[in-house]
């Protein structure tokens, strides 16, 4: 459980004991099932706690979910230190002799080049299991600050695949052929993946392909045992420059080509207000490429740069068309004349999208220190799906390689339906928040987040959407996502809301999860379900400011659970989807709070920040409700606590709860004050049914019922107590809590 008082241990392990040597690097014989793994896990948990580490486990769970506390491991780099940590504590996470983990690979680095996060993925017979493995966080000195692990012992003991890669490819292509997909824009790429299917681990061959005449990637997964099709899906999630590309189209590692960058000019909407008014203007373009990079794809004078290269996506295939030898790309946003084979207003979509991609790249680079996607990403605009219109935008990790020189891995795509509506504003790329939303998806993927690998409309994909919304809103300092698109195009598609999503919405997990039905009956839709988590992030940003919350959400998300299976829901269905959302959102908040409370630095300040974030989480029902559980603060004997934060009673939530683990002899004081403008009526109570408290003074409640306070409450018996904060008249409203322990 997250503790207020952290005993920070600097644990130097010169070598792990033979009993602690767990996990296999690079394979080796798989032994019989380890029947003693839970006992060995308990022993490893005990070792970690004895070293002063904080171990988080789920209710009734034997295995650890996470550990926090500074740990110094032997080794010259993150790869060696991660392996040493695995040997010492891996069994606590279920890493037994059967489980094979890859050597650690960096997920993100700081500006000084030091490792921030490293991951050891679980691999079975060469198939990497999505969302399985261990993720470790490092400080600048190379000490481990936290670890999160989720592995499958059952997956580790799967038999080898029956089908080889050739047979797997044939079966997957046959699955696409059954859907009439036989011609492809690019050579289909075969991947070996593992994941849970209906709760059971399976080895799968997956083909990623872009059908001819389209830019929307399609993936098919077949069972490596018998070649049966498991699922077919659209594989999308809604200094100097470096251009990455596969030289021969085969990969897997891209080549790097550094190129000179400089400034230029181009037409764009400089801010969302200008986009709403459709008022374009010439503005500075930064990080433009100023040298030949790849012949025919990215040459001097074309619209490419450090963060992206923008190309057109007509029916015949993507082509780069914006060209300005003087680096001045000036195009009118409604000019119907043509230059070459393209309308000028479509060229404006190139320049406007470039402007916002480079704005997102520069902003996220500052958040990370060293961006995990610091390369020229392909950005396709003006895609209209062969004239049918494409009312969507997405990021995909599928390679859009076009041959021997090809494109970098992954791409962004923005659709339009201008040819149907005859309105040049009916284009997703003209909304700055949509461009930044999709770029943030790319960032989360590039940093190692695997939220997007879950099932459609699953809790993890909803969090992925929330992070993308947050990325757009924090850069633009605006809680409205998709406002420009809704304003210009909403009436054309029967969308009459002010925006696609509003992160200032008074939504709660309990009241609004199913406001928009998902693809499957009884499921919520992931974007609108994500708006609830997104509202929590925006409220947190308002309370804590973006300098604190940007890295908290966009970088530290690797410390959160990455799949529903991690929180006890390996199989999702209409009967448990609500409980899965509650468990996943709650676990993410627990991870965030634990990270704040155990962060190096001033404990008093950490507690203050944790309180503000908890207030935001409780307002939207992510904590402090029966469905999501309470956050617990532990105050050891002789310690003090000062907790003060603002929150709000929203929707049907008329009670928030917090737990405190207290010691005998401590004195408490409580004050809850309703907002004057809202006239919030408030009260509080402890669950001290056994008279474990001695009340030195009576509770005071003002005549309006908007203020309740009490001091000199002495704890007579050490225990865990629940503080309930209630909205007396159930009319909702904001409030402020001040709770002190001394």
Image (spheres, grey):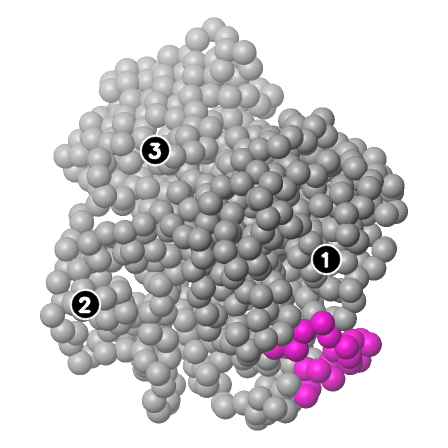
Question: Where 733 sits versus 350, above or below?
Answer: above
Marks 1/2: CA–CA distance = 47 Å
The residue pinned by badge 3 equals 609
Mark 2: give few (<14), some (14-19) or many (20+) Cα within 10 Å.
few
Q: Do labels 1 and 2 touch, CB within 8 Å?
A: no
Q: Quadrant of residue 711?
A: top left
Which element is circle 3 on?
A: helix
Q: Which residues are magenta?
A: 170-189
Examine the rendered structure and indicate whether residue 135 appears above or below residue 728: below
Comes first in the chain, label 1 or label 2? 2
Camera-nearest label, 1 or 2: 1
Instruction: Compute the Cα span from label 3 to label 1.
Output: 46 Å
| Label number found at residue 313 | 1
Which residue is under mark 2?
76
Q: Position of residue 113 (x, y in %)?
A: 29, 56
Q: Residue at x 35, y 25 (%)?
A: 644
In the depicted view, which residue is nearer to us: 328 or 584? 328
Q: Badge 1 local density, few (<14 within 10 Å), some, or many (20+)?
A: many
Left or right of 342? Residue 231 is: left
Residue 186 coordinates in the image, percent (x, y): 67, 74
Q: CA distance from mark 3 to mark 2?
A: 34 Å
């Amino acid at each position: 459980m997250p503790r207020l008082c952290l005993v920070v241990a600097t644990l130097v392990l010169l070598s792990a004991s033979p009993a602690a040597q767990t996990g296999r690097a690079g394979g080796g014989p798989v032994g019989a099932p380890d029947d003693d793994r839970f006992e060995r896990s308990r022993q490893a948990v005990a070792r970690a706690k004895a070293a002063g580490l904080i171990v988080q486990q789920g209710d009734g769970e034997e295995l650890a979910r996470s550990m926090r506390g500074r740990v110094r491991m032997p080794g010259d780099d993150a790869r060696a230190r991660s392996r040493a940590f695995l040997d010492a504590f891996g069994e606590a996470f279920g890493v037994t002799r059967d489980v094979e983990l890859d050597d650690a690979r960096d997920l993100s680095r700081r500006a000084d080049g030091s490792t921030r996060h490293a991951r050891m993925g679980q691999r079975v017979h060469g198939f990497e299991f999505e969302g399985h493995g261990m993720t470790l966080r490092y400080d600048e000195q190379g000490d481990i600050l936290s670890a999160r692990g989720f592995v499958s012992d059952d997956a580790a003991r799967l038999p080898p695949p029956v089908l080889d890669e050739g047979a797997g490819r044939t079966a997957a292509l046959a699955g696409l052929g059954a859907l009439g997909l036989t011609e492809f824009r690019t050579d289909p790429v075969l991947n070996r993946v593992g994941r849970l299917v209906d709760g059971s681990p399976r080895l799968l061959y997956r083909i990623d392909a872009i059908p001819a005449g389209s830019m929307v990637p399609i993936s098919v997964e077949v069972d490596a045992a018998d070649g049966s099709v498991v699922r077919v899906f659209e594989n999308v999630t809604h200094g100097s420059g470096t251009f990455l590309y596969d030289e021969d189209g085969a990969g897997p590692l891209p080549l790097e080509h550094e190129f000179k960058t400089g400034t230029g000019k181009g037409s764009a909407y400089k801010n969302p207000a200008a986009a709403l008014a459709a008022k374009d203007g010439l503005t500075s373009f930064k990080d433009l490429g100023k040298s030949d990079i790849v012949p025919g794809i990215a040459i001097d004078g074309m619209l490419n740069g450090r963060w992206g290269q923008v190309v057109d996506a007509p029916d015949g295939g993507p082509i780069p068309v914006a060209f300005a030898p003087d680096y001045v790309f000036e195009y009118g946003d409604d000019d119907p004349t043509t230059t070459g084979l393209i309308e000028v207003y479509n060229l404006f979509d190139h320049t406007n999208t470039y402007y916002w991609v480079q704005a997102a790249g520069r902003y996220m680079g500052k958040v990370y220190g060293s961006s995990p996607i610091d390369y020229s990403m392909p950005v396709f605009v003006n895609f209209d799906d062969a004239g049918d219109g494409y009312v969507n935008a997405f990021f995909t990790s599928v390679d859009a390689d076009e041959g021997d020189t090809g494109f970098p891995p992954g791409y962004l795509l923005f659709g339009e339906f201008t040819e149907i509506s005859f309105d040049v504003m009916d284009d997703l790329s003209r909304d700055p928040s949509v461009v930044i939303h999709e770029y943030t998806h790319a960032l989360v993927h590039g940093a190692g987040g695997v939220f997007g690998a879950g099932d459609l409309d699953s809790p993890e994909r909803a969090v992925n959407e929330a992070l993308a919304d947050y990325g757009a809103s924090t850069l633009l300092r605006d809680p409205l996502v998709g406002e420009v698109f809704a304003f210009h195009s909403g009436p054309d598609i029967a969308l009459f809301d002010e925006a696609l999503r509003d992160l200032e919405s008074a939504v709660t997990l309990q009241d609004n999860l199913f406001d928009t039905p998902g693809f499957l009956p009884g499921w919520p839709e992931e974007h609108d379900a994500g708006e609830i988590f997104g509202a929590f992030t925006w409220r947190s940003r308002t309370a804590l400011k973006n300098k604190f919350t940007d890295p908290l959400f966009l970088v530290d998300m690797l410390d959160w659970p990455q799949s529903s299976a991690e929180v006890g829901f390996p199989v999702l269905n209409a009967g448990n989807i609500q409980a899965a959302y509650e468990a996943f959102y709650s676990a993410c908040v627990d991870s965030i709070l634990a990270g704040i409370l155990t962060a190096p630095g001033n404990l008093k300040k950490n507690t203050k920040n944790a309180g503000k974030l908890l207030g935001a989480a409780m307002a939207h029902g992510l904590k402090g409700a029966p469905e999501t559980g309470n956050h617990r603060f532990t105050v050891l004997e002789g310690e003090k606590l000062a907790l003060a934060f603002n929150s709000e009673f929203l929707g049907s939530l008329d009670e928030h709860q917090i737990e405190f683990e207290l010691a005998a002899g401590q004195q408490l004081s409580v004050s809850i004050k309703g907002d004057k403008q809202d006239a919030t009526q408030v009260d509080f109570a402890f669950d001290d049914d056994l008279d474990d408290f001695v009340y030195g003074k009576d509770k005071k409640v003002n005549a309006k019922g908007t203020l309740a306070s009490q001091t000199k409450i002495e704890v007579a018996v050490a225990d865990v107590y629940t503080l309930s904060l209630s909205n007396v008249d159930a009319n909702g409203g904001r409030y402020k809590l001040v709770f002190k322990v001394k």
